[in-house]
Amino acid sequence: MTRIVRLLPLRKLDGFRDRVGSLDVQQVKRVCTKAKAIVKEHLARCAENLRYAVRYLANSSCTPQEKLRGMYDTGFGSIWQDDFPDGSLKNDYLTIRGSLIKADEPKAAVNIAAMSDEQARTVISQICSLSQAVAYVLGKQSNSEQ
């Protein structure tokens, strides 16, 4: 079985490629815009949870471990690594999460209780820094859109 294919002249193909190419570019731009909006939405939710966490840490007058345990329950525990774009924010979050949740003991409360005061203060400092970094990125994104 042999098929005979009629070849279009090159000048017709060029126009066809241009139309298809411009449609692809528009579709990619639309998908990228949606993706950016989703990332921004996730970051905004993270920023809100981080603000609650930092506020709790600042207003609590208990030991650093008790502050962390309470802060984890106030909303920090609902933040997921996929809420952050790849890069330094996600890495910082994973560092904090690695301090709170270990492979051999997945319960944050147990790991927090086992921390020294200095370790707990370090994690608290990291949480405050992450909160500032997320707020900065969100502010930078909203300024660039204006």
Image: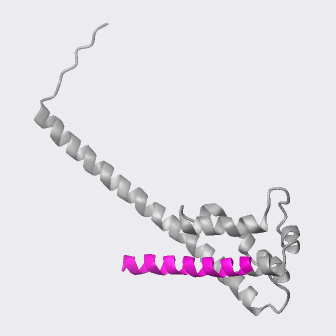
Q: At x 75% / y 68%, what residue is drawn?
A: 99
Q: Position of residue 4 (x, y in %)?
A: 22, 14
Q: Position of residue 20 (x, y in %)?
A: 26, 44
Q: Foreground residue, 25 or 89?
A: 89
Give the left or right position of residue 41, taking residue 15 as reference.
right
Q: Which residues are magenta?
A: 122-146
How many numbered marks, from 0 up? 0
Q: Is residue 20 magenta?
A: no
- Residue 100, can we see it? yes
Residue 51 found in image quarter: bottom right
Q: At x 69% / y 84%, what residue is drawn?
A: 54
- Residue 79, can we see it? no
Give the left or right position of residue 41, taking residue 52 as reference.
left
Residue 101 found in image quarter: bottom right
Is 22 placed above or below 17 here? below
Q: Position of residue 93 (x, y in %)?
A: 65, 68
Q: At x 88% / y 74%, what residue is drawn?
A: 113
Q: Position of residue 10 (x, y in %)?
A: 13, 33
The rendered magenta stretch, by its main secondary structure, is classed as helix
